[in-house]
Amino acid sequence: MKPLQFLILLALVLFVSAVARENSMPGGWSPIKNINDPHVTEIADYAVTEYDKRSGQKLKLEKVIKGDTQVVAGLNYRFILTATDGSSSGNYEAIVWEKVWEHFRNLTSFTPVHA
Ligand SMILES: *[C@@H]1O[C@H](CO)[C@@H](O)[C@H](O)[C@H]1NC(C)=O
């Protein structure tokens, strides 16, 4: 086998096993069924507001496009959302860690995505 073919095969194997892991293993991400749930909106809104606080920007949540959750010590939320600065809209991926019983929330990541 040529080195390039081997690399492609290796990449494919890693990709497939990563997908299999996400879908079946505990700790994997599962899709949020009701994206319009008020609590989902609240967490997404928190993500945008918190990002604004840290970055000094003035983004506002327009809508959540999709979301996943992951059981950790609490719950991780991962959103693809649209936010606007008033003149233009953009898509972002936000990850929020929530421990409801401790009233703890933290924005772990907020990055622009091109979707
Ligand atoms: C919240 O997340 C940020 C970014 O990952 C991290 O720097 C910070 O320490 C976290 N805060 C808490 C209280 O966990």
Image: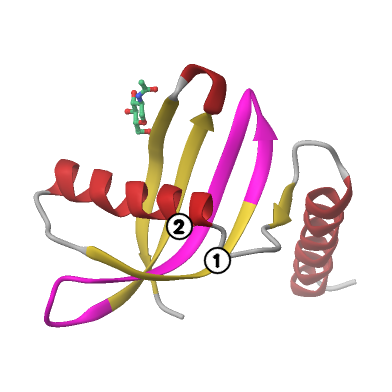
Amino acid type shown at disc 2: Thr
Q: Which residues are magenta?
A: 69-89
Residue marked by disc 1? 36
Amino acid type shown at disc 1: Asn
Label 1 SS: loop
Where in the figure is residue 89, as x and y percent of width and height? 25, 79
Label 2 SS: helix
| Magenta-span inclusion, residue 98 | no
Query: Quick one: quadrant of the N terminus?
Result: bottom right
Q: Nearer the viewer, residue 25 or 70?
A: 70
Compared with 114, 9 (above or below) is above
Name the N-terminal-most of marks 2 and 1.
1
> Could you tell whether 110 is left or right of 69 in the image?
left
Compared with 58, 96 (above or below) is above
Say if mark 2 contacts mark 1, CB within 8 Å: yes
Q: Residue furthest front?
A: 38
Label 2 near ligand 1 (CB < 8 Å): no
